Image (cartoon, grey):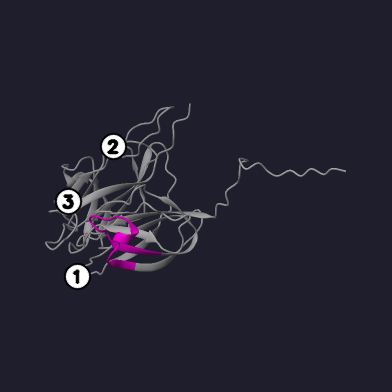
Amino acid sequence: MTMVGCSEPSDAPTTPNIPPLAYVRYINAVPDTLNTTVRFIDQVEYSPMTFVNVAFRALGQGNYQPTAAGSRKFRVFTADAVNFSAAGNTTVLVDTTITFEAGKYYTLLHSGFARAGASPRQRIVVLNDVFPTVTGANIALRAIHQAFGVGAVDLHAAPSATATLSSATRLVPNFAEAAVSPYVTAAVGPLAAAVTAPGAFTALVAAAAPAGTAGTTSVDPIGGSTIGGSIITAIAYPASPANSAGARFAAPGIVYYLDKQPPRTTP
């Protein structure tokens, strides 16, 4: 009797063993040091690999990155101006472990100052990004006060960066340094965030939000203040200190980050 054995062909499809994933992004809000690089050092698989050479006020490449959930250890380094590989990592700014829950979205906000004697000291602030439900006629906007040294401010929503603020909507009164506002719903349309001293109407800094681009049945929309369903974070930053070694900004500023794209247009 002849017995014939068979084995699965080497080119047969396989099913990857994907672990539960969280979604993580990194924003560099440290104004007085070099660009930064984030490296997860506990495992290579299912770790973000694109938060490299991130400038002050910038978002790590790719926005939210899928990350294996659970207790994760990572470090933030100053970025070598020539060698952006792991060998180029030099000074460790942060060495920490954070637990990420599967299915949740997180912003790693690198906040504070790196230079000796400056306050508050640089650290990672972990934001659990819970997105609100937004109808097609509205957007949602959240604000973060990182303009250390300015003190508490009022945050206004105006139709343009040069609009008269006495008739604008005061979104967040007496907004403290390091505070994070809840998401506020607003109607779609031109929008600018303006920061004033408490009770005042003279802008210390103002900036228009990106308008966005409407989608079609073949092209996805790009989020912005005029595109319903967009969810946006605005961060107020200080000017760069005189001793800054990284990206330099002569004045305070407001930068917008798209948290969630508007829904696609269906045929």
Residue at the disc numbered 1: 118
Residue sitting at x 37%, y 41%: 230
Earlier residue among tags 3 and 2: 3
Residue sitting at x 55%, y 55%: 19
Residue at the disc numbered 2: 211
Residue sitting at x 60%, y 46%: 15
Question: Which residue is at the front of the view, 151 or 32?
Answer: 32
Is 92 rendered above or below residue 160? Answer: below
Residue at the disc numbered 3: 205
Residue 109 appears in the picture as rendered = no
Is 79 part of what is drawn in magenta?
yes
Instruction: Tell me where residue 79 appears, x and y as whole percent.
Output: 27, 58
Question: Which residue is at the front of the view, 230 or 169?
Answer: 230
Question: Which residue is at the front of the view, 263 or 124?
Answer: 124
Badge 2 marks a residue whose secondary structure is loop
Instruction: Tell me where residue 124 appears, x and y as whole percent.
Output: 33, 64
Earlier residue among tags 2 and 1: 1
Amino acid type at image mark 3? Val
Is residue 161 left or right of 76 when viewed as pictured?
A: left
Question: Which residue is at the front of the view, 143 or 129?
Answer: 129
Is residue 247 left or right of 62 when viewed as pictured?
A: left
Camera-near label (3 vs 1) is: 1
Earlier residue among tags 3 and 1: 1
Amino acid type at image mark 1? Ala
Instruction: Tell me where residue 81 appears, x and y as whole percent.
Output: 22, 56
Is 129 rendered above or below residue 230? Answer: below
Is 188 part of what is drawn in magenta?
no
Amino acid type at image mark 2? Ala
Is 62 rendered above or below residue 102? Answer: above
- In the image, the segment drawn in magenta is 74-94
Residue sitting at x 17%, y 51%: 205
